[in-house]
Image (cartoon, rainbow, N blue to C red):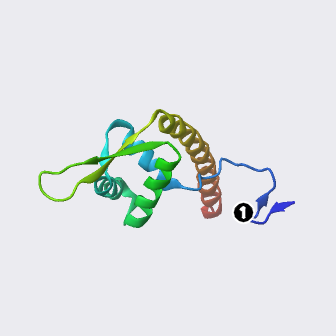
Amino acid sequence: MRNESTDAPEGADLGRMPKNFLASWLLLLLRNWSAHGYQLIQTLMVMGLGAVDPASVYRTLRQLEQEGYITSTWDPQDSGAARRMYSLTDAGEAYLSVWAKQLEQYQTVLTRFFDLYTTQKKEQEQP
């Protein structure tokens, strides 16, 4: 029997990609330093995530804070408005570990896929 939402066999996990890839990146970035939302957005783009939707980042940050994975405080600026400074909590560190394990499983599945793909392609190209 197939799961209609994913069209995968029921009960098959196959190291699926976490539903919210952005959350894993935000947790990782906040692991070693506290940052403002704008800094996080800029870093995500530098890390190769392309054009990041700021609304999605801030929505994800709010969700992570509601779930207790990060905290935020107001950082007063010498000039301009205060900004929120985000930091990882102990619960966030534990959750990041879970994300990392899931992503590692997903990476293993991708590696197998490309190994097989490359092998089949080479076989098809041989006369």
- Res 20 seen here: yes
Towards the viewer: 19 or 86: 86
**Numbered circles on residues, count:** 1
Q: Position of residue 8 (x, y in %)?
A: 76, 59
Local crowd size for mark 1, using a 10 Å CA cut-off: few (<14), some (14–19), many (≥20): few
Q: Where does the N terminus fall, quadrant-wise?
A: bottom right
Q: Residue at x 45, y 60 (%)?
A: 59
Residue 53 visible in the snapshot: no
What amino acid is labelled 1 in the image? Thr
Residue found at the very far right of the displayed protein: 1
At 57% from the left edge and 46% from the top edge, which residue is drawn?
107
Direction from residue 68 to residue 7 in the image, left or right: right
Q: Is residue 67 left or right of residue 89?
A: right
Query: Is 70 on the left or on the right of 115, as rendered?
Result: left
Q: Disc 1 on helix, strand or loop?
A: loop
Image spot of residue 20 (x, y percent)? 54, 55
Along the line of sight, the residue nearer the viewer: 9 or 115: 9
Of the pair 54 and 70, the residue shown nearer to us: 70
- The residue that disc 1 covers is 6
| Residue name at image x 41 percent, y 66 percent | 55
Task: Judge from the rendering whether residue 103 lies leftward or rightward of residue 31; answer left or right.
Answer: right
Q: Quadrant of residue 87?
A: top left
Q: Residue at x 23, y 54 (%)?
A: 82
Residue 91 picture location, percent across and down = 51, 36
In the rendered view, tell whether residue 32 sits above or below residue 3: above
